[in-house]
Image (cartoon, rainbow, N blue to C red):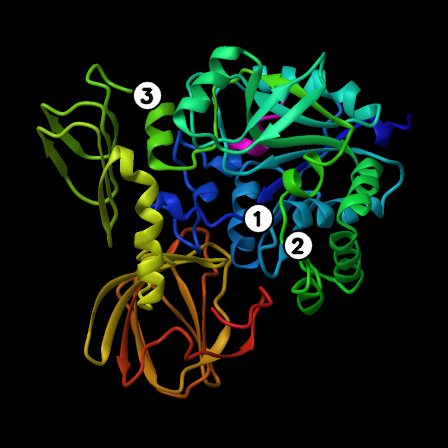
Amino acid sequence: MTNNESRIYPVILSGGSGTRLWPLSREQYPKQLLALTGERTLLQETVLRLDGAEQVANPLFVCNEEHRFLVAEQVRQLGKSPLAIMLEPTGRNTAPALTLAALVLKRGAGDPILLVMPADHNIRDSAAFRESVKKALPLAAKGRLVTFGVKPTAPATGYGYIKRGKGHDVAAFVEKPDLATAKLYVDSGEYAWNSGMFMVRLSVWFEELKRFEPEIARICEAAHAKGKNDGDFFRIDKETFARCPSNSIDYAVMEKTDRAAVVELDASWSDVGAWSSLWESGSRDVAGNVVSGDVYVHDTRDALLISQHRLLAVVGLDDIIVVETPDAVLVSKKERAQDVKEIVARLRAEGRSEHQVHRRVYRPWGSYEGVDAGARFQVKRLSVKPGAALSLQLHHHRAEHWVVVQGTARVTRGEEVFTLTENQSTYIPVGTKHRLENPGNIQLEIIEVQSGGYLGEDDIVRFDDVYNRHKD
């Protein structure tokens, strides 16, 4: 084997929306981008999980187009350099996502081994994970499609199961069982949870995909061939990819191939798929509570209590979930936690924004947060990163007043370019081209007061943007 063929290329899939972890997880800021289990986000923990392993290349990411700058920034914060960041114009599940990643690597020499990892898993024992990867490597090198079977700790009904055969053979993949069946699986000792992580040689993936799902292979190849680089990202052709069937790696290939293998993973794994699973994997106090933020607890047991914005006090309630954010609060019985997706569906159907964005909205230049709003006015707090710039733009329906709270602002207003410092302000009339930049070395904080007949974020006409966006 060449050096390239013996290396592991991590493929990190970051396309999920995480609706079951609302209100922390939103469509434009999903769970993989949140620090749910420690100081780092789930995506960052996924990137770092292979640190210390031998022959590991820089990771390749596949993510939603709306999350591209957030993914890039979180990787940059780790001091890592992605091999590539592939942008999906629309979600088509994990089989097309892996195929797009493989097509990027196919352009290089050799026949590398891909390690497929969703970005939203929690694995507390990274050393044990690396040991399982080490065991999987010779199997993948010999042409097997390896899945990682998690040693079950309980008869969980939220996971699919893998029945082990002789050695590393897979006897069967089975769907999520009911509780009685799950107990039989766990008691038998023959089953493992299906982790959704895989290791496969690039050529083997294409062989089996073309054997079982040739249409996915054909459309992904066509969409990739029409794709183009966009700064730090690679955009596939949107129109072509829209015709791609939606299918998972499991359904498309793993459950059909005769080359599947399983390696046991005993590393305190969780897919953090619901609030109840976050409680199960969290650090509990003597009463069984998992607590985060400014929380007071009295006579309460086995609860998950999260506060982001204000004091949360809970008295005399057991087996509940309370999640407080600046713009929404969730209260649920733990056993009904999965039903939060029904709330998200209703918010979406009613055209509300709480399913999509937080009160603080992140942009490549920084973030903005709603402070107050009423008839014909809106107040926001803008935070602009050092060296960053908003687009050169205008608004047809609103004027803006800017007050500098911290840092230095370079302002373009029509033909004027000038600097503002703390406690200074300016006014942007309706229909005037303008731009806000931070030329300094510290964060720029601005209070923006908008006034006008229409204050929607789609009232932006962009003339120039360093991030190649169509709208902010």
Q: Is residue 359 visible?
A: yes
Type of amino acid under label 2: Asp
Whole-percent x and y of residue 302? 22, 24
Tell me which residue sits at (41%, 83%) in the image.
Answer: 395
Tell me which residue sits at (57%, 58%) in the image.
Answer: 65
Residue under numbered circle 2: 232
Q: Earlier in the sequence, mark 1 or mark 3?
A: 1
Packing grade of label 1 (10 A; few <14, some 14-19, many >=20) is: some
Q: Nearer the viewer, mark 2 or mark 3?
A: 3
Q: Is residue 47 magenta?
A: yes
Position of 311 relative to 177 (above/below): below
Whole-percent x and y of residue 174? 57, 30
In what element is the residue under mark 1?
A: helix
Type of amino acid under label 3: Ser
Q: Is residue 407 visible?
A: no
Q: CA distance from mark 2 to mark 1?
A: 8 Å
Q: Is residue 373 magenta?
A: no
Residue under numbered circle 1: 72
Q: CA distance from mark 1 to mark 3?
A: 30 Å
Position of 247 relative to 378 (above/below): above
Residue under numbered circle 3: 283
Which quadrant of the figure has residue 339?
top left
| Image: magenta residue range | 45-51
Q: Say which of 406 and 118 sits in front.
A: 118
Type of amino acid under label 1: Ala
Q: Earlier in the sequence, mark 2 or mark 1?
A: 1
